Amino acid sequence: MHGVEGVSGALAAVGGAVSAGGRVAVAPLQSTAIEPPAFVPEYLLFPGWRIAVALVIVALSVALSKYAVRLLGRPVARQFRRQSVAQTVLRIVRLAIVLVGVGVGANVLGLELGDIVLSVTVFSAVLGIVLAPIVGSIINGVFVLSDQPFEIGDMIELDDGTKGFIDEITLSYTKIFTLDNTFLVMSNSNIRDRDVINYSAEDERTRLSLDVLVTYESDIDAARDLVERAARDCDAVVEGGPDIRIGSARYPAKPTAYINSYADNGVLLRLRYWALKPYKIGRIQSEVQTKLWTLVEESEATVEFAYPHTHLVFDETSGSLHVTGDEAANRRHATVSPAPGTPTHPVSDGEGPEPPADSGDATDATDVPNSTDAADGDD
C-alpha cells in the first residue's frame, strides 16, 4: 500500500485525486498561458486568437521601441560625447523593449524559457558552435567603443591601402564608406586585428612631403624658395602660424624645404608641409607639384630638375662605322662589328688623295674602257 499512497501523494501535489475504489483519476494541469479577461466576448475568442494577440503585442513593442529611441535620442546624445556610444545605448534600449514584447507574447502563447531552452547542455552547445563568432564580435565591439581608436566621420586607412570614412559603429560590426563610393562592412573582431591609420584623430591637419631632385649647377637657395612657394600658393595647405604640436614635439607650420642628401644625379630637396584636410591628399599633392613645375618654368633663376643622362662611348672594341654623304646628318649611327677575316674598305672624307684600291678593284677597272681613250681612237 505504500506504493499506492506514494502515487496518491504525488497526484495530490499536481492536482490529481484518488477514488474510493483505488483507481487514480487524473486532473488536467493548469496552463501557464494568460487567460482572457471575463469582459471579452466569446466571439472574439476564435481559434488561434492567442497567436494574433502575441503578434499584436510584438508589433506594438517594435513601434514603442522606435518612439522611445526618438524620444530619448537628444538626451542620450547630450550625455555621451561620442556619437557611436550614444547610438549603441539607443540600440540597447530599443532591443530591450522588443525583447520584453516578445516575452509577453510568448507568455500569451503559454511558452516559457524552459520550453525554448531544452537543457543547459543543448544551450551550451548552440552557444559554443553558432554564437561564438557573434559573441566574440560583440566583445570586440565593446573594446572598440571603449578604446576609441576611431569615431564616426573619421577618415581611416587600412593596412591594405583602403581609405574611407567611418559611417557606423555597432557592437558587432563597423561600416566604412570608402573613397571608391562603396561600403565596406567589417566585423569588429577583424578590424581590431588590423593596422588602422586614423587621419582625423583629434587634429585633421596632415603632414605631407615632396622630394625634388635638382642639378648641382642649380641655385639651391632659389630652388628651395620655389619649392616652398609652390606649397604656400595652395589653398588647402597651411601657410604659416604657430608651430604644430604633436605629442611633445613641435613642427613648423609653414612649408619648409630641406637639403635631404647629395644624390648621384643632383641635390635632393625634401619639402615638408601640412594639409588642412586629409580627405583629398592626392589632389593636394598634385596641385603642389603642378605649381612647382609652373614656377620653375617661369623663374629666371638657374634651377633645373635633375634626371639621369646616358652617354654612348665608342672605342676600338665597338667595330667600324660607314658613313657617306648626307647620311651622317639624316640618321642615327649604328655600329657593326666586321666578321673575322673580312677586309675593310677605307672611306674618303673628301680631302686629300683617294686611298689606294685593293687588287680586286684594280683588276675590275682594267676591263672597263676609258671614255677619253675611245675618243682619241676615233680621231
Image (cartoon, rainbow, N blue to C red):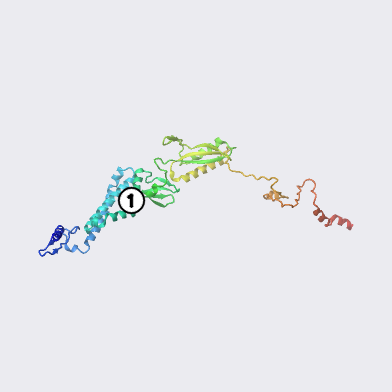
Residue lying at the far left in this picture: please name it.
20
Q: Is residue 241 visible?
A: no
Q: Quadrant of the N terminus?
A: bottom left
Q: Is residue 51 visible?
A: yes
* Helix, strand or loop for disc 1: helix
Q: Is residue 90 above or below residue 238?
A: below
Bin the neighbour count of mark 1 within 10 Å (Cα to Cα): few under 14, some 14-19, many 20 and up.
some
- What is the number of callouts on the image? 1
**Quick check: 302 left or right of 38?**
right
Residue 12 in picture, x, y percent from top left = 14, 58
Decide which of 144, 231 is in the foreground and name it. 144
Residue lying at the far front in this picture: please name it.
1
Decide which of 174, 245 is in the foreground and name it. 174
Q: Which residue carries the number 1 mark? A: 135
The residue type indicated by label 1 comes to Val
Quarter of the image for residue 267 reads top right
Decide which of 321, 283 is in the foreground and name it. 321
Residue ID at (54%, 39%): 268
Q: Quadrant of the C terminus?
A: bottom right
Q: Is residue 378 above or below residue 240?
A: below
Residue 313 in picture, x, y percent from top left = 66, 45
Residue 291 in picture, x, y percent from top left = 52, 42
